[in-house]
Image: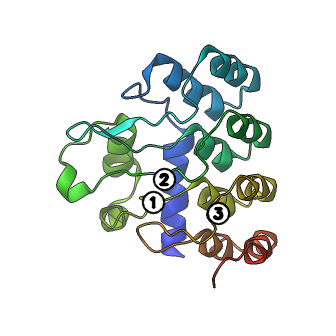
Amino acid sequence: MEFLKWFRSSDAVLFSSFKASIDGVGKLGAELREAVRAADTEKVKSLLDEGADVNAQDIQDKTRKEKGGATPLMIASRNGHGDIVEMLLAKGAKVNATINMGRLGSVGPTSSYELSHIIFITLPLIYRDLIKTNCLNGVTALMIASNHGHGKIVEMLLAKGAKVNVRNESGMTALMFASMSDHRDIVEMLLAKGAKK
C-alpha cells in the first residue's frame, strides 16, 4: 500500500500539476501535452492537425538526450479523458510507450523542472528511495489507466494492442496496479485478455 500511495502522489504531480517542458518536444508538442492535461479537446484536435507530435515526450536527461516523460496518451489515460485517448490513438499514438525518468544516482542534476520538483520538493523524504528504484520507469498508459480505474480507456488501449503482461522496472504489471487499487472490473478485463496472475 505504501507503494500505491507513493505512485499516486508522484503521478499526480507528473501528469497534472505542471505545464509541459519544451525540452525535446518543441512548442507544438509542449502545447499538445498541456491541452491534453487541460482536457481541451478542440485544442488537441487543432494541434494534431497542425502537426504536433502525438508521442511528444520531454527530455528527462540532457546528458544522454533521452526522452522519457509522459506522452500525451499517458496523460489522457491518467485523467480519464476517453475522447482524447481515442483521438490520439487514431493519430498513431504509441500504445506501449514507457516512462523513463532516469536513475537518481547516475543521472546527476535533472534537466526537467517537473522531475526535479517531484524529487526534491513535492514528495516526502521517505519516498526518495522508491524513486531510486525506478518505480515510474517502464510504466505504460495501460498501467496508468488500470491504476486509476478507467475501464473504457483500458478497453481502448487493449483494442489497439497494449501489452497486458509487460512489467515496469519494479516488476509491476497492469493487473497488479488494478488489483492494488481494487478495480475488480479492470482485473477481470485484463485476465480475460491473458494477464498472468
User: Marks 2 and 3: CB-CB under 8 Å?
Assistant: no
Which of 54/106 is in front? 54
Which numbered dot is residue 147?
3
Q: Residue at x 74, y 78 (%)?
A: 191
Q: Callout 3, which amino acid?
A: Asn
Vertical relation: 88 (above or below) 181: above
Identity of the amino acid at label 1?
Gly
Of mark 2 and mark 3, the one earlier in the sequence is 2
Q: CA distance from mark 2 to mark 3?
A: 15 Å
Asked whether the residues under the numbered discs 2 and 1 touch, taking CB atoms below 8 Å apart as contact, a structural biologist would say yes
Asked where in the image residue 96 lies, by quadrant, the reply is: bottom right
Q: Position of residue 133 (x, y in %)?
A: 33, 67
Would you name the residue on which mark 2 appears?
Answer: 98
Mark sitting on residue 138: 1
Please tell me which residue lies in front, 63 or 123. 63
The earlier-in-sequence mark between 2 and 1 is 2
Asked whether 159 or 21 is in front, the reply is 159
Q: Amino acid at mark 2?
A: Thr
